Image: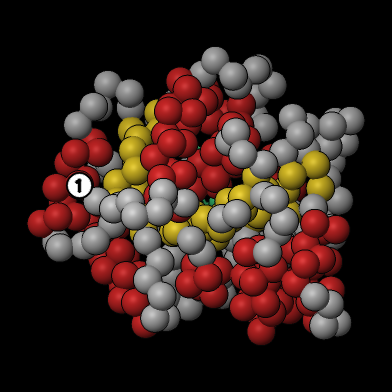
Amino acid sequence: MTLTAFVSAKGSPGVSTTAALLAGVAPRPTVLADLDPVGGDVVLRHRDPAGKPLAPDRGLLSLGAALRRGQADRVLPEHLQVVSGGLEVLVGVTSPEQVNGLGPLWPPLAQALRAVPGRDVFADCGRLTVGSPALPVLTAADGVVLVTRPHLEHLAHLRERLRWLLETLALGGTPVPVGVILIAPERDRGAAAECRQLLDTAHLRATVLGTLAQDEKGAAILTGRSDRPAGRTSLVRSARALLPALYRFVDPPLGGDLR
Ligand SMILES: Nc1ncnc2c1ncn2[C@@H]1O[C@H](COP(=O)(O)OP(=O)(O)OP(=O)(O)O)[C@@H](O)[C@H]1O
Ligand SMILES: [Mg+2]
């Protein structure tokens, strides 16, 4: 199955919400992996099926310890937890020291994420920075998705970060496709086309996958700030509509062209 890394170019456009939302509505078995090196949100935003908090030490930390002991990369399922609604998650770290502790384990971690049997993995890798420890996950992924808002300054940062990302991924030999998801008001129907044009003008080879609704109420439910049902929000509807493009992107039919 596939590994998709979600990142943001700058600011907090909603990458964690997007990764969690898409994993939550995905029709294929999917794991949400919280790999934000600055500290994860999954443990704060989700509860277990009984309404209790998740265990903060079962996830990336316990998996890191297992990989350090030289255990095979297929142990990842042992470190997952199930949240209310049935989604499997890999809980992230809570402090920068814990990220430092992972150090050289990021490449084997990336391989472990690729080897999860029978599940796609959607990994929230946080902000895309030059020294990000999560970069090995991006280079091992089937696709990297940049989440952005459509405003001019966001798009300008996207363009520059994308240029650097495409060069970095190209160094790895096997090209990793890069996609873009925009978070825009539903009435802004031209956001994706404008972004496509900007990338074309800059000769940046990235696929604009589509738009997720900018929906504050929906996002409040998904980030645990409201306990109303999320199913009928425009955010969830837009996520369901976007999934086919995401699957074509990370798991293209043989012989398919991405652009
Ligand atoms: N589709 C959306 N529509 C409206 N608001 C959203 C949407 N997605 C996320 N948000 C809001 O944006 C804020 C940031 O969301 P989130 O934590 O997902 O961003 P992030 O990019 O992961 O940020 P960080 O860099 O801090 O990890 C939250 O208040 C969230 O509710
Ligand atoms: Mg985040």
Q: What x and y, as percent, mark residue 188?
A: 25, 27
Q: What x and y, as percent, mark residue 68?
A: 80, 81
**Residue carrying label 1:** 196
Q: What x and y, as percent, mark residue 158?
A: 29, 57
Indicate whether 162 appears above or below 14.
Answer: below
Indicate whether 8 appears above or below 183.
Answer: below
Is ligand 1 within 8 Å of the beta carbon of the residue shown at mark 1?
A: no
Q: Residue at x 40, y 53 (%)?
A: 254
Nearer to the camera, 131 or 115: 115
Q: Residue at x 26, y 69 (%)?
A: 163
Q: Residue at x 14, y 61 (%)?
A: 202
Confirm whether residue 188 shows in the render.
yes
Q: What x and y, as percent, mark residue 214?
A: 40, 30
Residue reaching furthest to the left: 201
The picture quadrant where one finds residue 72 is: bottom right
Count the marks.
1
Relative placement, left or right, of 40 versus 130 is right
Image quadrant containing the N terminus: bottom right
Q: Residue at x 47, y 51 (%)?
A: 251
Question: Which three-letter amino acid code belongs to the residue tagged 1?
Answer: Arg
Residue reaching furthest to the front: 255
Q: How is the image coloured?
A: secondary structure
Indicate whether 117 appears above or below 175.
Answer: above
Q: Circle 1 sits in a helix, a strand or a loop, which is it?
A: helix
Nearer to the camera, 104 or 132: 104
Task: Tell me the crowding category of disc 1: few under 14, some 14 to 19, or many 20 or more residues within 10 angstroms, Cα based.
Answer: some
Relative placement, left or right, of 217 versus 259 is right
Relative placement, left or right, of 103 versus 166 is right
Confirm whether residue 65 shows in the render.
no
